[in-house]
Image (tube, grey):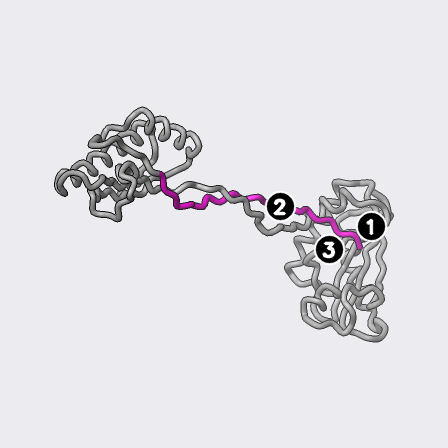
Amino acid sequence: MKKYFLILQFLAIFPLFSQQSFAVYFDFDQYNINPFAEQQLNDWLEKNTEIEVTKIYGYCDWKGDNQYNDNLSLQRVASVHAFLKSKNISILSNYESKGFGEDFTQSKIQAANRKVTIDYQKRVYEKQHLPVITKEPSLAESIKKAKPGDVIRLQNMNFFNNSAVMVPKSKPVLTDLLCILEENPKLKIEIQGHICCQRGKDINGISTARARAVYVYLLRNKIDRKRLSFKGFGITKPIHPIPEKSEAQEDENRRVEIKIIEN
Protein backbone atom coordinates (compact mmCIF):
# COMPACT_ATOMS: atom_id res chain seq x y z
CA MET A 1 0.00 0.00 0.00
CA LYS A 2 1.46 3.34 -1.04
CA LYS A 3 1.15 6.31 1.23
CA TYR A 4 1.85 9.92 0.45
CA PHE A 5 3.02 12.38 3.03
CA LEU A 6 3.59 16.10 3.04
CA ILE A 7 6.61 16.93 5.19
CA LEU A 8 6.90 20.46 6.53
CA GLN A 9 10.12 21.63 8.15
CA PHE A 10 9.80 24.87 10.06
CA LEU A 11 12.77 27.05 10.86
CA ALA A 12 12.20 29.34 13.81
CA ILE A 13 14.42 32.21 14.89
CA PHE A 14 14.46 32.92 18.61
CA PRO A 15 16.03 36.06 20.13
CA LEU A 16 18.44 35.40 22.98
CA PHE A 17 20.22 38.03 25.06
CA SER A 18 23.97 38.14 25.65
CA GLN A 19 25.09 40.36 28.55
CA GLN A 20 28.17 42.44 27.73
CA SER A 21 29.99 45.62 28.79
CA PHE A 22 31.78 48.50 27.07
CA ALA A 23 34.00 51.22 28.59
CA VAL A 24 34.36 54.89 27.60
CA TYR A 25 37.41 56.83 28.87
CA PHE A 26 37.55 60.53 29.72
CA ASP A 27 40.18 63.23 29.94
CA PHE A 28 41.40 64.34 33.36
CA ASP A 29 38.80 66.38 35.24
CA GLN A 30 36.39 66.33 32.27
CA TYR A 31 32.92 64.88 31.78
CA ASN A 32 32.43 65.75 28.10
CA ILE A 33 33.12 62.99 25.62
CA ASN A 34 36.35 63.76 23.75
CA PRO A 35 36.67 63.16 19.96
CA PHE A 36 38.67 59.95 20.39
CA ALA A 37 36.10 58.46 22.80
CA GLU A 38 33.27 59.57 20.51
CA GLN A 39 34.88 57.73 17.60
CA GLN A 40 35.25 54.61 19.75
CA LEU A 41 31.59 54.83 20.71
CA ASN A 42 30.51 55.22 17.10
CA ASP A 43 32.63 52.26 16.02
CA TRP A 44 31.16 50.16 18.82
CA LEU A 45 27.56 51.10 18.00
CA GLU A 46 28.12 50.39 14.31
CA LYS A 47 29.00 46.80 15.20
CA ASN A 48 26.27 46.45 17.84
CA THR A 49 22.97 47.63 16.43
CA GLU A 50 20.73 45.20 18.33
CA ILE A 51 21.47 46.23 21.93
CA GLU A 52 19.58 47.38 24.99
CA VAL A 53 21.44 49.28 27.73
CA THR A 54 20.85 48.02 31.27
CA LYS A 55 23.45 49.92 33.38
CA ILE A 56 25.62 53.03 33.10
CA TYR A 57 28.27 53.43 35.83
CA GLY A 58 30.66 56.39 36.22
CA TYR A 59 34.13 56.42 37.81
CA CYS A 60 36.94 58.90 38.60
CA ASP A 61 40.59 58.78 39.59
CA TRP A 62 41.57 59.52 43.19
CA LYS A 63 42.58 63.13 42.63
CA GLY A 64 40.17 65.65 44.18
CA ASP A 65 37.86 65.20 47.17
CA ASN A 66 35.15 62.57 47.39
CA GLN A 67 32.21 64.93 46.86
CA TYR A 68 33.79 66.44 43.75
CA ASN A 69 34.60 63.01 42.29
CA ASP A 70 31.11 61.69 43.05
CA ASN A 71 29.56 64.60 41.12
CA LEU A 72 32.06 64.26 38.26
CA SER A 73 31.34 60.54 37.85
CA LEU A 74 27.58 61.27 37.66
CA GLN A 75 28.21 64.01 35.08
CA ARG A 76 30.13 61.47 32.98
CA VAL A 77 27.17 59.09 33.25
CA ALA A 78 24.83 61.85 32.09
CA SER A 79 27.06 62.62 29.08
CA VAL A 80 27.11 59.00 27.95
CA HIS A 81 23.38 58.65 28.49
CA ALA A 82 22.71 61.74 26.36
CA PHE A 83 25.03 60.45 23.64
CA LEU A 84 23.27 57.07 23.50
CA LYS A 85 19.86 58.72 23.36
CA SER A 86 21.04 60.93 20.49
CA LYS A 87 21.90 57.74 18.60
CA ASN A 88 18.45 56.24 19.33
CA ILE A 89 19.99 53.42 21.35
CA SER A 90 17.47 51.47 23.40
CA ILE A 91 17.88 52.03 27.15
CA LEU A 92 15.76 50.13 29.66
CA SER A 93 13.25 52.38 31.41
CA ASN A 94 14.54 51.03 34.74
CA TYR A 95 18.22 51.01 33.78
CA GLU A 96 20.68 51.31 36.66
CA SER A 97 22.70 54.54 36.93
CA LYS A 98 25.46 55.08 39.51
CA GLY A 99 28.41 57.36 40.14
CA PHE A 100 31.12 55.64 42.14
CA GLY A 101 33.50 58.59 42.23
CA GLU A 102 36.82 57.21 43.46
CA ASP A 103 35.21 54.56 45.70
CA PHE A 104 36.22 51.44 43.79
CA THR A 105 39.36 49.38 43.31
CA GLN A 106 41.62 51.85 41.51
CA SER A 107 43.96 50.88 38.73
CA LYS A 108 47.59 51.98 39.00
CA ILE A 109 47.08 53.58 35.58
CA GLN A 110 45.10 56.71 36.40
CA ALA A 111 43.70 57.10 32.86
CA ALA A 112 42.00 53.71 33.26
CA ASN A 113 40.04 55.01 36.26
CA ARG A 114 38.47 57.94 34.42
CA LYS A 115 35.67 56.04 32.70
CA VAL A 116 32.06 55.11 32.23
CA THR A 117 31.02 51.47 31.76
CA ILE A 118 27.95 50.59 29.72
CA ASP A 119 26.34 47.26 30.50
CA TYR A 120 24.04 46.07 27.75
CA GLN A 121 22.26 43.02 26.44
CA LYS A 122 22.73 42.11 22.84
CA ARG A 123 20.06 40.30 20.88
CA VAL A 124 21.55 37.16 19.37
CA TYR A 125 19.21 35.36 16.99
CA GLU A 126 19.52 31.64 17.22
CA LYS A 127 18.04 29.43 14.54
CA GLN A 128 16.23 26.37 15.79
CA HIS A 129 14.52 23.64 13.82
CA LEU A 130 11.06 22.86 15.06
CA PRO A 131 9.83 19.28 14.96
CA VAL A 132 8.98 17.89 11.56
CA ILE A 133 5.25 17.78 10.99
CA THR A 134 3.88 15.08 8.73
CA LYS A 135 0.44 15.52 7.32
CA GLU A 136 -1.32 12.78 5.43
CA PRO A 137 -3.06 14.08 2.32
CA SER A 138 -6.81 13.96 1.84
CA LEU A 139 -8.44 11.07 0.04
CA ALA A 140 -9.00 13.26 -3.02
CA GLU A 141 -5.32 14.27 -3.11
CA SER A 142 -4.17 10.66 -2.74
CA ILE A 143 -6.41 9.44 -5.56
CA LYS A 144 -5.40 12.33 -7.82
CA LYS A 145 -1.74 11.34 -7.50
CA ALA A 146 -2.35 7.60 -7.66
CA LYS A 147 -1.55 5.34 -10.60
CA PRO A 148 -3.28 2.11 -11.63
CA GLY A 149 -2.31 -0.57 -9.14
CA ASP A 150 -1.90 1.81 -6.19
CA VAL A 151 -3.82 0.90 -3.05
CA ILE A 152 -5.21 3.63 -0.79
CA ARG A 153 -6.63 3.10 2.67
CA LEU A 154 -9.98 4.69 3.51
CA GLN A 155 -8.98 6.45 6.72
CA ASN A 156 -11.55 6.36 9.56
CA MET A 157 -13.58 3.70 7.79
CA ASN A 158 -14.60 1.55 10.78
CA PHE A 159 -17.09 -1.22 11.45
CA PHE A 160 -18.72 -2.72 14.48
CA ASN A 161 -16.83 -5.73 15.79
CA ASN A 162 -17.26 -8.88 13.68
CA SER A 163 -19.77 -7.05 11.52
CA ALA A 164 -20.14 -5.37 8.12
CA VAL A 165 -22.17 -2.54 9.69
CA MET A 166 -20.28 0.74 9.54
CA VAL A 167 -20.05 2.98 12.60
CA PRO A 168 -21.76 6.37 12.13
CA LYS A 169 -18.47 8.31 11.88
CA SER A 170 -17.61 6.42 8.68
CA LYS A 171 -20.31 8.26 6.71
CA PRO A 172 -18.11 11.31 5.82
CA VAL A 173 -15.55 8.92 4.33
CA LEU A 174 -18.20 7.34 2.12
CA THR A 175 -19.42 10.78 1.09
CA ASP A 176 -15.89 11.80 0.12
CA LEU A 177 -15.41 8.67 -1.95
CA LEU A 178 -18.76 9.16 -3.68
CA CYS A 179 -17.93 12.78 -4.56
CA ILE A 180 -14.54 11.77 -5.93
CA LEU A 181 -16.11 9.14 -8.18
CA GLU A 182 -18.73 11.62 -9.38
CA GLU A 183 -16.06 14.21 -10.18
CA ASN A 184 -13.75 11.71 -11.90
CA PRO A 185 -15.89 9.70 -14.34
CA LYS A 186 -12.87 7.74 -15.65
CA LEU A 187 -11.95 6.49 -12.18
CA LYS A 188 -12.41 2.74 -11.64
CA ILE A 189 -11.70 1.06 -8.32
CA GLU A 190 -11.64 -2.29 -6.57
CA ILE A 191 -12.89 -2.13 -2.97
CA GLN A 192 -10.85 -4.38 -0.70
CA GLY A 193 -11.89 -5.55 2.74
CA HIS A 194 -9.65 -6.81 5.58
CA ILE A 195 -10.17 -8.11 9.10
CA CYS A 196 -8.09 -8.35 12.25
CA CYS A 197 -7.48 -10.63 15.19
CA GLN A 198 -8.29 -14.03 13.69
CA ARG A 199 -5.55 -16.59 13.11
CA GLY A 200 -7.49 -18.78 10.72
CA LYS A 201 -9.65 -18.09 7.68
CA ASP A 202 -12.33 -15.46 7.43
CA ILE A 203 -15.01 -18.06 8.13
CA ASN A 204 -17.91 -15.65 8.15
CA GLY A 205 -16.70 -13.70 5.15
CA ILE A 206 -16.61 -10.44 7.12
CA SER A 207 -13.87 -8.85 5.00
CA THR A 208 -15.85 -9.48 1.81
CA ALA A 209 -19.06 -8.23 3.44
CA ARG A 210 -17.36 -4.99 4.47
CA ALA A 211 -16.05 -4.36 0.97
CA ARG A 212 -19.49 -5.17 -0.42
CA ALA A 213 -21.13 -2.67 1.98
CA VAL A 214 -19.08 0.15 0.45
CA TYR A 215 -19.80 -1.18 -3.04
CA VAL A 216 -23.56 -1.24 -2.40
CA TYR A 217 -23.52 2.29 -1.00
CA LEU A 218 -21.87 3.59 -4.18
CA LEU A 219 -24.29 1.69 -6.42
CA ARG A 220 -27.27 3.09 -4.56
CA ASN A 221 -25.88 6.56 -5.17
CA LYS A 222 -25.82 5.99 -8.93
CA ILE A 223 -22.18 5.10 -9.52
CA ASP A 224 -21.94 2.82 -12.59
CA ARG A 225 -21.25 -0.77 -11.49
CA LYS A 226 -18.79 -1.11 -14.38
CA ARG A 227 -16.50 1.20 -12.48
CA LEU A 228 -16.64 -0.83 -9.27
CA SER A 229 -15.65 -4.25 -7.96
CA PHE A 230 -15.05 -5.62 -4.47
CA LYS A 231 -13.00 -8.35 -2.81
CA GLY A 232 -12.31 -9.64 0.70
CA PHE A 233 -8.78 -10.62 1.78
CA GLY A 234 -9.51 -11.86 5.30
CA ILE A 235 -6.28 -11.72 7.33
CA THR A 236 -3.95 -12.43 4.41
CA LYS A 237 -2.64 -8.85 4.17
CA PRO A 238 -2.32 -7.47 7.70
CA ILE A 239 -0.47 -4.20 8.35
CA HIS A 240 0.57 -5.53 11.77
CA PRO A 241 1.37 -9.15 12.68
CA ILE A 242 -1.48 -11.15 14.20
CA PRO A 243 -2.17 -11.31 17.11
CA GLU A 244 -2.05 -7.55 17.32
CA LYS A 245 -0.43 -5.86 20.33
CA SER A 246 -2.96 -3.06 20.77
CA GLU A 247 -6.42 -1.84 19.82
CA ALA A 248 -4.79 0.67 17.48
CA GLN A 249 -3.11 -2.16 15.58
CA GLU A 250 -6.40 -4.04 15.45
CA ASP A 251 -8.11 -0.97 13.96
CA GLU A 252 -5.41 -0.63 11.32
CA ASN A 253 -5.71 -4.26 10.32
CA ARG A 254 -9.51 -4.06 10.29
CA ARG A 255 -9.79 -1.77 7.28
CA VAL A 256 -11.16 -1.09 3.82
CA GLU A 257 -8.91 0.03 0.98
CA ILE A 258 -9.41 0.89 -2.65
CA LYS A 259 -7.17 -0.27 -5.46
CA ILE A 260 -6.95 2.05 -8.46
CA ILE A 261 -7.89 0.13 -11.59
CA GLU A 262 -8.11 3.07 -13.95
CA ASN A 263 -7.61 6.75 -13.33
Residue at image point 27% right, 28% down? 33
Depicted 192 relative to depicted 249: above or below: above
In this figure, which residue is indicated by the disc labeled 1? Answer: 150
Numbered range of the magenta stretch: 1-22
In the rendered structure, which disc, 2 or 3, sits on the residue that comes first in sequence? 2
Marks 3 and 1, how far apart at CA: 13 Å
Amino acid type of the residue tagged 3 in the rendering:
Leu
- Rendering quarter of residue 155: bottom right
What secondary structure is marked by label 2?
Answer: loop
Q: Nearer the viewer, mark 3 or mark 1?
A: 1
In this figure, which residue is indicated by the disc labeled 3? Answer: 154
Residue 4 circle label: none
Depicted 67 relative to depicted 154: above or below: above
Please name whichever residue, 122 or 259, is drawn nearer the observer in this view of the structure. 122
Which is the main secondary structure of the residues drawn in magenta?
Answer: strand
In this figure, which residue is indicated by the disc labeled 2? Answer: 9
Does the magenta segment cover residue 104?
A: no
Q: Is residue 251 left or right of residue 25?
A: right
What secondary structure is marked by label 1?
Answer: loop
Q: Measured from the top left, where is residue 241 in percent x and y?
A: 78, 69
Q: How many marks?
A: 3
In the rendered structure, which disc, 1 or 2, sits on the residue that comes first in sequence? 2
Does the magenta segment cover residue 12?
A: yes
Q: Is residue 178 left or right of residue 96?
A: right
